[in-house]
Image (cartoon, rainbow, N blue to C red):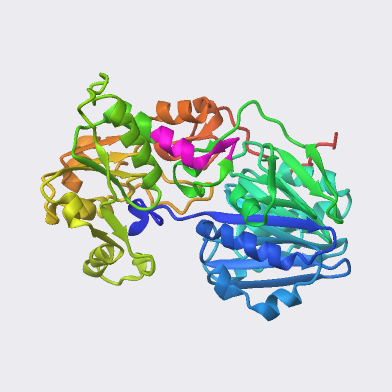
Amino acid sequence: MEPGGDGIAAGPREKCGVVGVALEDRPAARPLYYALYALQHRGQESAGIVTHDGFQQHSHVERGLVGDAFDLDDLESLTGTTGIGHVRYPTAGSLDKSCAQPFSVSFKSGSLGLSHNGNLVNAAEIRDDLAHQGHAFTSDGDTEVIAHDLARNLLDADLVRAVKRTMERIHGSYSLTIMHDDTVLGVRDPKGNRPLCIGKLDDGYVLASESAAIDTLDGELVRDVRPGELVVLESDGTGYDTYQLVEEDHTGHCFFEHVYFARPDSVIDDELVYEVRRTLGRKLWEEAGVETDVVMPVPDSGRAFASGYADAAAETTADGDPRPEDDDGVAFAEGLMKNRYVGRTFIMPTQDERERAVRLKLNPIRSTVEGKTVTIIDDSIVRGTTSTQLVDLMKDAGAEEVHMRIGAPPIIAPCYLGIDMATRDELIAADRSTEEIRKAIDADSLSYLSIDAIAETLGAGHEDLCLGCVTGEYPFDVEDEATDRDVERPAIGETPPADD
């Protein structure tokens, strides 16, 4: 992936990152800008900020990385002490500026700005319903659908009731930061599929997809936003109010946040992601350890897995017996060096060029590999192309054996909830056994981490995780797909229930 994983060539791509701040008397633009930098790994196609100065809304949204999307004049034009921001990788909607976020709209009851991480699975139904009521859309993204629905509800309801009414209609994954005039809100879907947390600054409060953004602002993580919760920041930066608008028996947290997407220095569900990955690496050794000379990560997200794997290998043998004192186990080694100045490989027009691009991005350290047996740790295999090339790289560098160990279960189904993942036709594990995949990538052995190991490490039952991409059963009602629980899709077009 990018970083690490099969996405070096064509794997799951980052979703999106959202942020919102309310400060006492300091302009919000620069803190938002810095927070977006901290969330850049979650989206590289566009970046945007919306602020409010108490009188009017200001917006700047551009294609490209955060550093390219804003200059000093842009930041100075974004006046006001409250604001929201967004970095985007397109998962629903066209790849053009009309789908870049935050999405802004003005209406009779004021102005709205929305930043969205996730994906609705009933956006088309709501869009059709609103279009019949006269709403005109400027993009094909689901964020605009949420904005129009919320704007409609704000015409005859207060802020909290309007948000609740919209939550009762939208179905899918979403973590939102919203501006209604100069008020910043945070909303997390009832299953908590996408992360969102609250942080305290010296002079205000922040909402962000990951705690790493709060760290960048020298803030303190308060807690995660609860599934189904609305958080309303005081516009003067002095506090916040919370409202538990929807409660469900079970959550549907995306396990891939811990495996790959989140920064390792972020804290999600009270757990440091780096330590979660190290624990997953230890379980990978317990379940499928192989005695080799060295174990090495695919940079960067495989590093914590490989570290935990090597630590566990120093304590026990692959058979689970205590390691003899004169046996050092499997040595951790950095055997692949990453060139960080090569762009995404999918721009390469031919297959030959795409294969060469892997060598441009990753180069083996021959002295670490030559004449040795090697285990490569990666976070996932998606299409299998890159895994094949990595095995070839190791063998070309003189490795005697190359074993692949994967820190996640096989990906057998697409994601409909905010990850730009391959279709079933493109997923190598969709219709192949592990042995068939091993042969396809030409590894000496191949093993994946079990779903049970993921659930145990995260301290959650299967019923509290979104495992759709590894089981083919989803916690939401996705058309033509199976569900892993009883799910009631909202009936669009009917009279909404009365507010509590």
Q: Residue at x 80, y 55 (%)?
A: 203
2 or 270, nearer to the observer:
270
Q: Position of residue 209 (x, y in %)?
A: 62, 50
Give the image quarter of residue 294: top left
Vertical order, 357 against 368 (above or below)? below
Image side of residue 466 versus residue 437, left or right: right
Count of numbered labels shown in the rendering: 0
Q: Position of residue 289 (x, y in %)?
A: 26, 30
Q: Residue at x 19, y 32 (%)?
A: 291
Quadrant for the C terminus in the image: top right
Q: Position of residue 165 (x, y in %)?
A: 78, 44
431 or 367, nearer to the observer:
367
Residue 371 can be seen in this image: yes
Question: In the displayed image of the protein, which residue is found farthest to the top?
Answer: 321
Image side of residue 189 versus residue 237, left or right: left
Question: In the displayed image of the protein, which residue is found farthest to the bottom?
Answer: 73
Q: Indicate yes or no whether the magenta region holds residue 378.
A: no
Q: Residue at x 25, y 52 (%)?
A: 335
Q: Residue at x 88, y 61 (%)?
A: 109
Give the image quarter of residue 135: bottom right
Q: Main secondary structure of the magenta part?
A: helix
Q: Position of residue 108 (x, y in %)?
A: 87, 64
Vertical order, 387 against 79 (above or below)? above
Image side of residue 427 versus residue 192, left or right: left
Vertical order, 318 against 297 (above or below)? above
Give the image quarter of residue 111: bottom right
Image: magenta residue range: 268-280
Q: Indicate yes or no whether the magenta region holds residue 277.
A: yes
